[in-house]
Amino acid sequence: MLRFRWETEFKETEIGEIPRDWEVYPLGEVVEDAIVGSTPLKKISKYWTNGTIPWLTNKEVEYGKINYIEDTEEKVNVIALEETNLKLVPPNSLIISFTASVGKVVINKVPITTNQQFISFVLKSIPDTVKYLGYFFLLNRELIESFSGATPFNFITKEKALQIPIIFPPLSEQSRIATVLSWFDDLIEVKKRQNEILEKTAMAIFKSWFIDFEPFRDGKFVYIEELGKEIPKGWEVKRLYELCKILRGLNFKSNEVIFEYAKGYIPVLRTNNIKGGFEIDFSDLMFVKEDKINPEKLLKENDILLSASNGNPELVGNFAVFLNTFTDLTFSFGAFIYLIRVNNHEMFPYVYLSLSDNSFREYVASAISGTNINNLNLSDLKNFPVLIPPSHILQSFHSLVEPLFQKIILNQKQIMTLRKIRDTLLPLLVFGKLRVEEV
């Protein structure tokens, strides 16, 4: 049985009020070992050939969640462990990024290594303490950054990291706090996995029908030069702008922008908020006065936001669908984003899957090469060729995949609601304002 109570007795500490029976310790007090990651020289192939030991990099983990890692994109081998200063991190360690992208939180499920952006902490009490501290650091990113000192970019040494003060409840309460917060994260992960399966199912049907033309093999085909392949006779090719309204994001002067909500301001999404698929990160927003926003550029449900420019060319063309559970907020979108609003709602799944196909990524890669490096021009996006089958085939396809998309959208809205609840509970539980007495 889950039971809470509101705390009434507090004491003041260097990081705020906490319950009288809780303590504040430097991180080093609860750590047995702290391991700084490193990168074996890439040009020395013997460190990487036939690698089996996971090697973690910053690009594989996200803000706003505890990243549970079981595998990584790159792997090193035993020779790297023997001949370099790379060390193996035991399972259930608390791993935090302390360089550049400071404050990403990881717990490893298997032995791994990391690059130099991470410090891994082997704790004296596991697994409940590692989960609890994962949530503590998830909440206190600014506290972590305050230890970076006066450097041009965030960098925190191991010695500094071990001095970071942590709120330390009794072990039994750490366990209860971690259990409650984990319930929300576990539900979120289940719904995310459901969405991955639903989207892969929809994409498999799309490819079968409109890439491989499996249901239409018995008909006549004609070669279309602009697509570089044969398509069923009677089908046509349209440009994206014929199916969608496409708008460029808004530019603002620096003195028109704030980064905390104020009355009369509208939140504006940027490229860093676009995670992909149906995933938009609503943290790190900027806000602009209502009278500076063109009403035409206020976002609606199922608008597609596409990254038009980014420091990483692989992220140009990345897109996500806008869904809003913030009933009291209207959103707009900033420079370097294009809005794609499908004219006919029944075409939405088809357009979404067309943009998800490899052909669109190849088109974008070609468009941003040469003089347009890292920048997708509006005209190029508008002129993306889209294969259009006869209306009765589109209707049949829509009836097949629409239930999948409705479930994806429902799941995603539930994910957003679960995150809001977790984020509301997080400071209350970690600072002991709300005590978990029983789970």
Image (cartoon, rainbow, N blue to C red):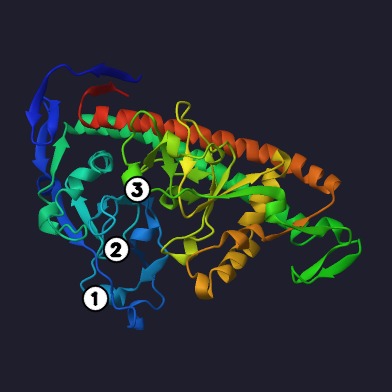
Residue 125 appears in the rendering: no
Which amino acid is tagged 3? Answer: Tyr
Label 1 crowd (10 A; few <14 / some 14-19 / many >=20): few
Which of the two discs, 3 and 1, labels the residue nearer the N terminus? 3
Task: Please report the residue visible at 59 percent of the width from the left and 63 percent of the height from the top.
Answer: 361
In the displayed structure, would residue 319 be above or below residue 268? below
Q: Quick one: 370 or 274, which is closer to the camera?
A: 370
Image position, residue 21 (x, y; %): 11, 25
For this view, does 104 lie left or right of residue 169? right
In the displayed structure, would residue 85 be above or below residue 14? below
Which amino acid is tagged 2? Answer: Thr
Q: Which residue is mark 3?
A: 63
Which of the two discs, 2 and 1, labels the residue nearer the N terminus? 1
Q: Which residue is mark 1?
A: 82
The reply to whether the C-beta atoms of the residues labelled 2 and 3 are less than 8 Å apart is no
Task: Please report the residue visible at 29 percent of the width from the left and 63 percent of the height from the top.
Answer: 114
Query: Which image quarter holds the C terminus?
Result: top left
For this view, does 137 lie left or right of residue 168? right
Q: Which mark is residue 114?
A: 2
Which of the two discs, 2 and 3, labels the residue nearer the N terminus? 3
In the displayed structure, would residue 51 be above or below residue 22? below
* Snapshot quadrant of residue 15: top left
